[in-house]
């Protein structure tokens, strides 16, 4: 791991030198990666389809402060990005290799750090994604393997999000999926996709049921993108006497211009036999995110994000205990505000404040006493090549 860290830092230094030289010659040395992490067809953004391997890397470090008491494993509640309290840490260090041609494509990404340790699969903890696909007919592709999620506005890589932290909604959505995707890239504007996965958020199958989904992305202009995705699955135990069929729907809209970046997300989920008050009844959940960034200059920007997560019957959250050790559902609202500085185009430095409130239950701890509110301060830096 130490050798891997030294190698990546060295490559990052070389990329900084390359970026400076590129600007001197008028080259575009990076792109805005915001919202690219959950694209339905990530290969759509690839500019080189000549059959060459492209190697890239990314490192992201942080320092965070939480008012909530850490769990026994040293991580905060809902841990993903910046999960440790009052500590310097490494969110992600990763290396990727991509191959893209007219007939075949593949992506392999290996990573380490606090993010995979706190929130990733325990079976393949070092694999972020590993998939390959081939062209069936004209614009129709079949891909199989391990995938990063295509659901939601935010990804686990801070460079692909407006904020440093992840919204509560993002934490309970799938991070990773294993299975197959059938993608029809009709044009640069329209993409349709059929999916089949082992489960809602696992690499390894947990029962005999598969998860099926449909996704659609439409870009009426180069600045605006609208997407819809769903997943139908049954995550109940294989020996359970009843089936808890889940129907999860995700809607996203993004807008990106020179000055403004805007993201909207809405989710609605249903699950059979899941009401806490009456297990024979259907349960529902909904959530949303609104995130906005404004660039004062190419280097300096400010941003805000509002979030809402309403899952009173624990469709996604699993058992959560209040101060009386009773099982409750999450009903959370939150607000985040921060500033971003980009020393070079392929980097970020962010500092932000965040407040979360579970307005019906005391699920946090403040100074050894139950609390409804958690406050956060996050400082992070990242660079990629």
Image (spheres, rainbow, N blue to C red):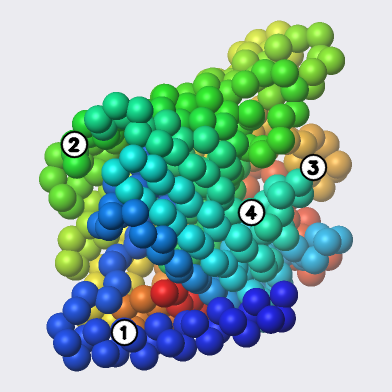
Please report whichever mark, 1 or 4, sits nearer to the chain's N-terminal start.
Answer: 1
Residue at the image point whose x is 38% and y is 87% from the top:
16
User: Viewer-nearest of labels 3 and 4?
Assistant: 4
Q: Secondary structure at mark 2?
A: loop
Placement of the N terminus among the 4 image quadrants:
bottom right
Measured as percent of width and height from the top left, residue 102 is found at 29, 43
Measured as percent of width and height from the top left, residue 316 is found at 64, 34
Residue labelled with disc 3: 321
Please report whichever mark, 3 or 4, sits nearer to the chain's N-terminal start.
Answer: 4
Residue at the image point whose x is 36% and y is 90% from the top:
17
Please report whichever mark, 4 or 2, sits nearer to the chain's N-terminal start.
Answer: 4
Q: Is residue 239 left or right of residue 332?
A: right
- Disc assigned to residue 187: 2
Q: CA distance from mark 3 to mark 4?
A: 32 Å
Measured as percent of width and height from the top left, residue 336 is found at 46, 63
Q: CA distance from mark 2 to mark 1?
A: 32 Å
User: Viewer-nearest of labels 1 and 3?
Assistant: 1
Residue labelled with disc 4: 127
Q: Quadrant of residue 345?
A: bottom left
How many numbered discs sit on the rendered protein?
4
């Amino acid at each position: 791991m130490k050798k891997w860290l030294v190698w990546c830092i060295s490559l990052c230094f070389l990329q900084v030198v390359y970026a400076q030289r590129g600007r001197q010659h008028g080259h575009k040395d990076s792109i805005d990666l915001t919202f690219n992490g959950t694209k339905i067809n990530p290969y759509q953004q690839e500019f080189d389809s000549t059959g060459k391997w492209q190697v890239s890397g990314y490192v992201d470090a942080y320092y965070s402060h939480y008012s909530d008491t850490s769990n026994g494993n040293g991580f905060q509640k809902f841990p993903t990005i910046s999960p440790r309290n009052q500590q310097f840490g490494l969110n992600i260090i990763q290396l990727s290799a991509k191959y893209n041609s007219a007939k075949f494509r593949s992506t392999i990404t290996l990573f380490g750090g606090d993010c995979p340790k706190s929130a990733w699969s325990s079976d393949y903890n070092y694999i972020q994604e590993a998939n390959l696909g081939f062209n069936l007919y004209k614009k129709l592709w079949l891909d199989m393997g391990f995938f990063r999620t295509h659901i939601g506005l935010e990804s686990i890589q801070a460079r692909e999000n407006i904020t440093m932290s992840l919204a509560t909604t993002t934490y309970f959505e799938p991070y990773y999926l294993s299975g197959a995707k059938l993608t029809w890239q009709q044009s640069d504007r329209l993409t349709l996709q059929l999916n089949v996965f082992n489960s809602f958020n696992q690499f390894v199958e947990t029962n005999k049921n598969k998860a099926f989904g449909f996704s659609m992305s439409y870009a009426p202009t180069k600045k605006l993108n609208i997407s819809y995705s769903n997943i139908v699955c049954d995550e109940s135990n294989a020996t359970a006497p009843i089936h808890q069929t889940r129907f999860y729907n995700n809607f996203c809209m993004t807008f990106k211009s020179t000055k403004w970046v805007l993201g909207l997300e809405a989710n609605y989920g249903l699950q059979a036999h899941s009401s806490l008050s009456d297990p024979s009844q259907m349960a529902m959940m909904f959530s949303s995110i609104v995130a906005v960034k404004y660039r004062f200059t190419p280097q300096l920007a400010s941003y805000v994000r509002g979030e809402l997560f309403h899952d009173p019957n624990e469709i996604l959250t699993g058992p959560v205990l209040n101060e009386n050790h009773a099982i409750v559902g999450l009903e959370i609202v939150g607000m985040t505000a921060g500033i971003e500085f980009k020393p070079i185009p392929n980097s970020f430095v962010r500092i932000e404040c965040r407040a979360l409130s579970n307005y019906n239950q005391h699920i946090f701890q403040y100074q050894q006493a139950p609390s409804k509110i958690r406050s956060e301060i996050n400082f992070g830096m990242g660079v990629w090549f």
